[in-house]
Image (spheres, rainbow, N blue to C red):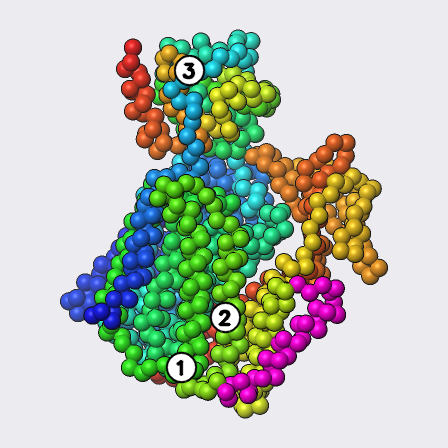
Amino acid sequence: MKKNLWRMVPFLIFMVLALFFWRGLSLDPHEVPSAQVGKALPAFKLPTLESDKIFTPAVLRGHVVLLNVWASWCAACTEEQIFLMELAQKGVVIYGLDYKDHPNDAKAWLEEWGNPYRSIGSDRDGKVSIDLGVYGAPETFLIDKTGVIRYRHVGVLTKEIWAREFLMRIKHWEAQA
Amino acid sequence: MIAEIGLFSLVLALLFAILLVAVPTWGLLVEKPRLINAARVYVCGQFLFVAISYCCLTACFLNDDFTVIYVLTNSSLTLPWFYKLCAVWGGHEGSMLLWVAILSVWMLAVNFFSRELERAIRIRVLVVLGALSVGFILFLLATSNPFLRQFQLLKSTGRDLNPLLQDPGFLFHPPMLYMGYVGFSVAFAFAIAALWLGRVEASWAKWTRPWTLAAWCCLTAGITLGSWWAYRELGWGGWWFWDPVENASFMPWLVGTALLHSLMVSEKRQQLMAWTLLLAISAFSLSLVGTFLVRSGVLTSVHAFAVDPSRGLYILIFLLVVIGGSLLLFAARAQTLQNQRRLAVVSRASALLLNSVFLGVAMLTVLMGTVYPLLIDGLGLGKLSVGAPYFNTVFIPLMIPVFILMGVGVHLHWQGDSPRRLFARLNKEIVLSFILPALLLMVLEKKINAGVYLGLVLAAWVLLSSARVFWTRVKQRGMRDIGPSFIGMVMAHCGMAVTMIGIAVSSGYGLQDDVKMAPGSHAMLAGYTIEFISESVLTGPNYHGSRARFLIHNAHHHAEIFPEKRIYDVGQMAMTDSAIDVTPFRDIYIALGEPLDDDAWSVRLYYKPFVRWIWGGGFLIVMGGLCALSHRRYYTHKKPLPSLEAPTL
């Protein structure tokens, strides 16, 4: 029997590999921890894209909201737009932050892909986004009623991520007074 | 409507695949020939409905049906029609459908070309392939349905195919690669069928060989095309990046090559049966692992595909069942295939064994490098990436014995040989393969680069030894009686040598320069004057940008090339479309970098001697494989039959 033990070797190698594959599934190679979670939104004052109102953290107060960072030049942003439209129709409050973008391009893009946002701040030079710690579009922040950042997702927001990361948190922060 | 037909057909195909697994297996248990023979009908049924489904997706692309999410994300109104055909496999869902479609084609081929095979084996092979189909079609339906609709009314022109993929190389590269990947499933199914049956017929290896060879040819062609595409399109002047996705295709190739050679020993000498079975299982397993690595997003790659953990989980479970199960089956059953005869120490069989061991080890080093970041991350030791330095350090030393053995092995006798007689036969070749490269380098280049010299010695050794063995065979048997598989072997080995020359010279004597150039200025590179003549505005069907005109000349040569910088309209993605002045002995490669102040550009210039030989060698290898595949021996059976068509190709 001992002579035939080598035949188990390929199987064992594979099982070790599979174990690491399984671990790898729950690790995100892109993940970088965020320093902003748990802190209040930085103070900012931006023009809005749709009117001559001003976009400030005060606008977001009173609801648990999503702040979605996007841009018309961002190809990946188109991928989440259908889902954001669905969310908006379900009543989720979404605000936009248009990142390093020209307002005319942004408006044309919204016309094409749909506009799920209550209001959009136009961050043309990207300064507010730097304060927020944004390192690329799309990113989505979950902000509670008092304007504190509670969660941050980097990359395209999908149904799965929504169900796994956002739903419970939203319920939790909705319940807080 | 078309999308729904496609989806429905896919469900029907799943049904046929399940029947293909269940009914003949039941038939084998209760020994009812009628149930067993039904397998043939189910294979045809599965093929038919997968084909319908694939055609439906293609039709959705051609009709610009943007209510289908997959079409919306991978096509646009302005995309040319032939790229729309390719866009079908431009994303995750469609490429998985292509995978299933190719699997069905291979199954149909096995069904038709294996009629002479003993029924017990043939049915088991089809059942195993059917089980694989069930797994993949379920994967499509459960996690990556390409026919998914969305009902937002959008004024959209589509998000366009990834501009990187809008290249003629992409027309053929993925289907070829998949033909190879999936083709190994046939060898895998033969191996599992043999283990299931608990005995290996003498003819088992003979039956497995043409399928392995066909799959291996496709994979070689796919890898060669992929490398050529990366060179042209990625704009970095490299042809191989040791990227996880490239490694995913290279690992099955290494094992497939080992399998081809080991199968030969199994057929001719009835030896190494267990090793051959293990290689057959590994080759396909590595194709599956490659799929997992690419699709699950556990590794980052320049070929970023859909990142989705639920897909990853499904594939992982599928891997566990298929690979884990078959390796367990191997461990349990392989002792029934004990070899009777021992190998002679110095013989062709032992050289082939040694070579396949080296290829296997080479595969393990590539595997190790590919998954190492995952292991480190999994152990919580940090994040890192493994790059070309690791692969070059561990992989190149392993190729040296492979090349030496390639030259030695073909001269050895099957029964056994003595080293002294071998040396006496080959002393001229050995001496020449050291002298010729040295002479060539001294005449053509001022300084001798040790790495290049080593590469050339190995290449010369393989070429001289192949020429010698060919000449000996011609003297013995005359030109007419040389079999195509022998010619194919010589061609493929020479192809390896040609590729080696290309790799050695282009990496040893290549030059690279980053310069700032404006129209009217010029630069010097490797004895050529490169002049930036002018710049013009570029307007394409779905992009715009700048097009530069460069003149390359020296005393004997004069050529104009036009590198471009394209901005694709939909994604606003900037693409460097490099331009290459090609001759058989060197490439001059110009890529536009960033526009600088006024009208200057940062321009990257490459001089790459012999770089074409890399793909030329790949082409020779494929030709050699096809030549061997044309051997009639594979298609004649116990009962002599009139010559049959070659399978699938």
The residue segment tinted magenta is: B420-449
Chain letter for mark 1: B
Q: Secondary structure at mark 2?
A: helix
Q: Is residue B508 visible?
A: yes
Give the quadrant of residue B121: bottom left
- Identify residue type, mark 3: Ala
User: How far is the residue under mark 2 from the one under mark 3?
Assistant: 63 Å
Q: Decide if residue B353 is on the left or right side of residue B172.
A: left
Task: Determine the main secondary structure of the stretch shown in magenta.
Answer: helix
Mark 2 vs mark 3: in front: 2
User: How far is the residue under mark 3 from the one under mark 1?
Assistant: 75 Å
Residue B429 lies within the magenta run: yes
Return the residue at label 1.
B345
Residue B578: image location, x then y, percent: 67, 47
| B381, B176: nearer the viewer | B381
Q: Is residue B176 visible?
A: no
Return the residue at label 3.
A40
Mark positioned earlier in the residue sequence (1 or 2): 1
